[in-house]
Amino acid sequence: MTVAVETGLWQLDATASTVGIRHKTMWGLVTVKGGFGALNGTGEVRPDGSAVGTVTFDVASLDTGNAKRDTHLRSADFFDADHHPEITFAARSAELRDGDQVHVVGQLTVRGISRPLSLTARLTDGDATGLTLDTEFSVDRDQFGLGWNQLGMIRGRTTVTAALRFVRTTG
């Protein structure tokens, strides 16, 4: 699929977007899944076809289906929501390549720690008024100060999945 994406400003449609995480715990025997309910984002498609933008999600909106675990994840042991209420991904460059593949270079900020992150997203649909990007990537939580690991139960990388729907706001 080749999609011509219109230049201009775009706004994340939070009601049509999802950001989820999954991580193996209990020595790799259990996979914990969760999602962020409060998302925000904007982007700009430039005349040359490249794009920049920012997506932010509210740490307090993380829901894994277990209230006690969610409270712990928001604590200083993990995300420290009181001091760092948002996780932000700032896309410095996004370029459509090979039909529907979008190469994204940016910076992920978690707990006030920023790290470069490159990923590939797939443009799953798009027209003059809206577009959807799907991606899945993994991060090393230790790089963001999320190293709490009682009895070595939590190992490996965390997988992040996102389906982000943007609507065009101006030309």
Image (spheres, rainbow, N blue to C red):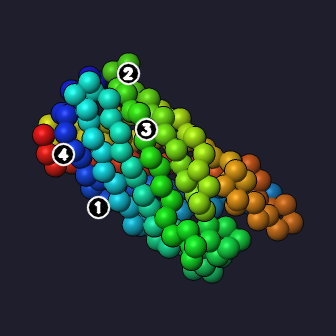
Labels 1 and 4: the sequence-earlier one: 1
**Distance between the alpha carbons at the discs numbered 1 and 2:** 27 Å
- At 59% from the left edge and 50% from the top edge, which residue is drawn? 114
The numbered mark at residue 97 is 2
Q: Which amino acid lies under the numbered mark 4 shown in the image of this protein?
A: Arg
Q: How many marks?
A: 4
Label 4 environment density (alpha carbons within 10 Å; few <14, some 14–19, many ≥20): many
User: Which residue corresponds to mark 1?
Assistant: 15
Q: Position of residue 129 (x, y in %)?
A: 15, 42
Q: Which amino acid lies under the numbered mark 2 shown in the image of this protein?
A: Arg
The answer to whether 152 is drawn above or below residue 168 in the figure is below
- Residue 85 located left or right of residue 98: right
- Residue 104 located left or right of residue 1: right
**Distance between the alpha carbons at the discs numbered 1 and 4:** 15 Å
Rendered image quadrant of residue 38: bottom left
Labels 3 and 4: the sequence-earlier one: 3
Labels 2 and 3: the sequence-earlier one: 3
Which mark is in front, 1 or 3? 3
For numbered disc 2, what is the local secondary structure?
strand
**Distance between the alpha carbons at the discs numbered 2 and 4:** 21 Å
Q: Quadrant of the C terminus?
A: top left
The numbered mark at residue 92 is 3
For numbered disc 4, what is the local secondary structure?
strand
Residues under numbered marks 1 and 3 in contact, where contact means CB atoms less than 8 Å apart: no
